[in-house]
Amino acid sequence: MVWGVKMIDPIGKMNNLMKNTSIGLLYLMETWQEAAIDDTIWTTDVGGLTGTVTRSVAEEPYQKVILDGPANDDIARLYTVHQWQLAPDTWGLNTFNKLLIMEWEAKFVTPASILETEFLMGLTAGAASTRTSMNIAAFILDGAGKLNSLTDNAATETVNTVGTPTLTNWNKYGIVAYAGTIEFYVNEVMQARHITNLPDYNVYGNFYLIEEAAANSGQLHIANVSIRPGVVV
């Protein structure tokens, strides 16, 4: 007996899926294996007196990057060099892309010290975007230091609450965009689905914090990061 595709996949579903998802679309899987942050993949930006973006292996098994702002008004940002197509309103039969997924692991240290009106983590049209910028799909912090989901299209926004994860624990975050929809996940459970004010732009994976005046030591720790487009929904 000869085993082959037809034997293990008699109706050809797996074979078709492999063909449709293996067309060389650019994706990112970052596990922070290198001794330093790779500047061909990531750009870092700091401001204020002592804002830092540093790689750390101090919490095995996590290998991570820490965005830190130990002094008032310190800024720390990490964003991808490459951009991905985010176009839930325009993806269709005439486009290769039908899907974009961004997933990452993160935890906060002293989240109350991070300026909620500026913080974001997610997908942004601008490299220097903050929570108040246009054309983003991201997790943000509300005034009570809890997570919200945000989509912004040309300054018109949709914002939803996102459960109550313990931010100082490691959690897995995800943004999934497809036709007419952007979904937000925490620990693989969908917390919000946006169908209005969806941005259609080329976007960066972007993590940004600024330290709130009169409060210090807010940090964002980021472990595995994956960004991947798809052609099958």
Image: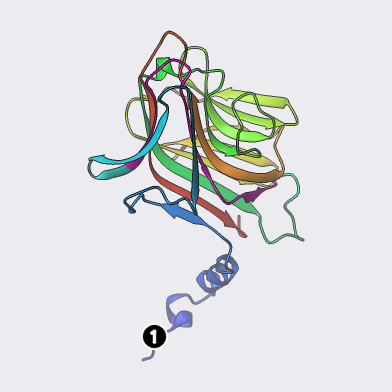
Left or right, residue 223 beside residue 126: left
The image shows residue 102, relative to residue 112, as above or below, that is: below
Image quadrant holding the N terminus, namely bottom left
Image quadrant holding the C terminus, namely bottom right
Residue lying farthest bottom?
Answer: 1
Secondary structure, magenta segment, majority class: strand
Q: Whole-percent x and y of residue 220?
A: 40, 30
> Tell me, what colour scheme is on the image?
rainbow
Instruction: Look at 76% across and 49% down and name the residue there.
Output: 90
Q: Is residue 72 rendered magenta in the image?
A: yes
Which residue is at the front of the view, 191 or 66?
66
Instruction: Look at 49% across and 47% down and name the residue there.
Output: 42
**Looking at numbered disc 1 in the image, what kind of residue is underneath it?**
Trp
Left or right, residue 118 beside residue 179: left
Q: Whole-percent x and y of residue 204?
A: 59, 44
The image shows residue 67, relative to residue 94, as above or below, that is: above
Q: Which residue is mark 1?
A: 3
The stretch of residues the image draws in magenta is 64-88
Left or right, residue 106 beside residue 22: left
Q: Does dot 1 land on a helix, a strand or a loop?
A: loop
Left or right, residue 137 beside residue 222: right
The image shows residue 152, relative to residue 41, as above or below, that is: above
Instruction: Look at 58% across and 24% down and name the residue there.
Output: 160
Q: Whole-percent x and y of residue 202?
A: 67, 47
Tag count: 1
Residue lying farthest front?
Answer: 49
Q: Whole-percent x and y of residue 87?
A: 70, 47
Q: Quadrant of residue 117?
A: top right
Q: Is residue 26 rendered magenta in the image?
A: no
